[in-house]
Amino acid sequence: MSAIINFSLNLDKLDKSKVIKGAKGNYYNVTLSLNDEVSQYGQNASLFDTQTKEERTAKSERNYVGNGKVVWTDGNISAAPMENKAIAQTTPASNDVDLPF
């Protein structure tokens, strides 16, 4: 259940308005897309800006910021377990946050 993926990130494509300033540094949320097929360049992974729920619903175009390839895997990649729904339902609606996962 592990893999190593190398990426080449194009810093010029990062939307500076999406930088999140935190107490321990600045953060930028990206989403990894891993494909079963390899491109003509030998790549099978892409990074793009994490989209909001509204952007996903509107089928907005993704802003790709990097490409890469899996360089090692044990052959068993699994999805992370989902958050406990009972806990999520007790959170007040005013604290709703659009998480990237």
Image: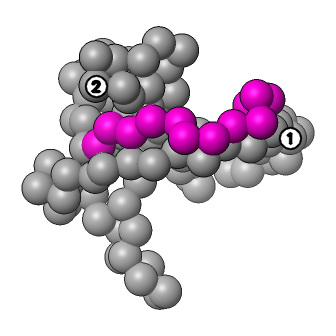
Boundaries of the magenta span: 66-80
Color encoding of the figure = one colour
Residue with the mark numbered 2: 41
Rounded to the nearest angstrom, the CA distance separating label 2 from label 1 is 40 Å
- Viewed as shown, does residue 83 lie left or right of 46? right
Give whichever of 100, 72 is nearer the camera: 72
- In x, y percent, where is residue 11? 19, 58
Give whichever of 101, 46 is nearer the camera: 46
Disc 1 marks which amino acid? Asn
- In x, y percent, where is residue 77? 74, 31
Q: Residue at x 25, y 44 (%)?
A: 65
Residue with the mark numbered 1: 84
- Is residue 92 placed above or below 60 in the rendered structure? below
Q: Residue at x 22, y 35 (%)?
A: 63
Tell me the quarter of the image containing the N terminus.
top right
Q: Count neighbours of disc 2 (C-alpha within 10 A) and say few if under 14, some if 14 to 19, many if 20 or more.
A: few
